[in-house]
Image (cartoon, rainbow, N blue to C red):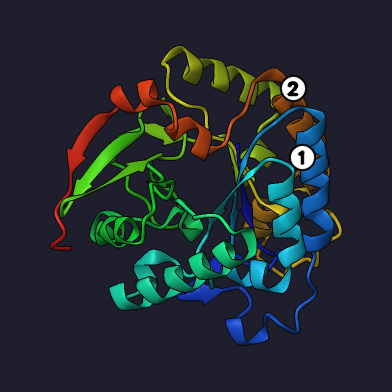
């Protein structure tokens, strides 16, 4: 179970977000009101999760980071400024991840070992990101969407978790959970997909995943359960994608989290049997 801790305006568009970085401080903030609802639901249903905090969010609201870790969850990072990987240089990414990791470690007093890129934006052209993450001491990543979609994707990547060897370093990659539907790979386990599909469909898809012994990875954002967030004036299609079923998501999440024993990524990679059974791949850093 994973939560990408970001604001209602952290929606990528072009080379930035729907609200540019210089206007974030003046925008209404909602995460400090919404995240406790997720924490309460997880506590009720005995869920342990990984919370991928934006460094900017943690900097503004250190109390919610401390509340999250005090309830037994893992703190990982989503970067600092919610920049898509393929819109950054290696130097810019290194600066962003260094800042985010430092902020979170200063708040939690613990080493941050997990990363998820905004928008699952690791692509075949940005494999260099794994080397930088490993050099910073990250043990795992969950930044690949192994199917085609609106934002960046890596559709030829394995659907299964793998150990990546890159420039003498190793890091475990957890691709987002997808199902093959003939000619397309589709996810119904997070974000807009989770909001769009009925709970009965998600449950049936989960059964398919569990039969293959692949981990079932769920991800949500605080905005996915927040009907009181400011509404952006999107086109009709984009408005549907970003706001469909928001009022129903808490109930759906409650149903799903009662069905399975969800863990954090940190607890999964601490299982040596799990790691032993993973395939290993070697990546080139010329990209």
Give the mark toward the camera: 1 or 2. 2
Q: Secondary structure at mark 2?
A: helix
Callout 1–callout 2 Cβ contact below 8 Å: no
The residue closer to the viewer here, 209 or 34, is: 34
In the rendered image, which quarter contains the N terminus? top right
The C terminus - image quarter: bottom left
Report whether residue 141 is seen: yes
Residue at 38% x, 41% y: name it. 147
The residue that disc 1 covers is 249
Residue for point 86% across, 59% down:
228
Give the residue at mark 2: 258
Q: How many marks?
A: 2
Q: Give how far across and how far down residue 115 sits, in percent.
A: 46, 54
Rendered residue at 52%/28% (across/down): 216
Q: Is residue 249 left or right of residue 109?
A: right
Relative placement, left or right, of 57 versus 111 is right
Find residue 160 and report its image quarter. top left
In the displayed structure, 113 sits above or below 30; it is above
Q: Residue furthest bottom?
A: 22
Say above or below: 269 vs 77.
above
Q: Residue furthest front?
A: 109
Identified at 57% across, 34% down, the residue is 188
Q: Is residue 230 above or below residue 254?
A: below
Packing grade of label 2 (10 A; few <14, some 14-19, many >=20) is some
């Amino acid at each position: 179970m994973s939560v990408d801790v970001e604001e209602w305006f952290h929606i990528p568009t072009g080379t930035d977000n729907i609200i540019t970085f210089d206007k974030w401080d003046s925008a209404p903030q909602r995460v400090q009101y919404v995240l406790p609802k997720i924490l309460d639901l997880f506590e009720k249903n005995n869920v342990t999760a990984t919370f991928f905090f934006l460094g900017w969010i943690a900097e503004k609201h250190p109390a919610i980071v401390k509340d999250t870790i005090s309830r037994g969850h893992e703190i990982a990072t989503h970067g600092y400024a919610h920049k898509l990987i393929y819109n950054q240089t290696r130097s810019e990414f290194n600066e962003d991840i260094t800042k985010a990791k430092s902020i979170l470690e200063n708040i939690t007093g613990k080493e941050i070992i997990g990363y998820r890129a905004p928008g699952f934006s690791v692509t075949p052209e940005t494999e260099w990101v794994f080397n930088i993450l490993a050099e910073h001491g990250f043990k795992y990543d969950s930044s690949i969407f192994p199917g085609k979609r609106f934002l960046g994707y890596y559709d030829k990547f394995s659907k299964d978790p793998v150990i990546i060897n890159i420039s003498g370093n190793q890091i475990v990659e957890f691709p987002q959970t997808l199902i093959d539907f003939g000619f397309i790979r589709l996810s119904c386990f997070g974000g807009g997909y989770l909001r769009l599909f009925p709970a009965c469909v998600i449950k049936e898809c989960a059964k398919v995943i569990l039969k293959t012994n692949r981990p079932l990875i769920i991800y949500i954002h605080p905005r996915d359960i927040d009907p009181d967030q400011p509404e952006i004036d999107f086109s009709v299609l984009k408005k549907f994608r970003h706001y469909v079923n928001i009022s129903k998501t808490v109930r759906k999440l409650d149903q799903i989290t009662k069905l399975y024993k969800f863990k954090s990524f940190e607890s999964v990679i601490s299982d040596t049997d799990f790691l032993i059974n993973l395939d290993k791949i070697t990546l080139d850093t010329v990209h």
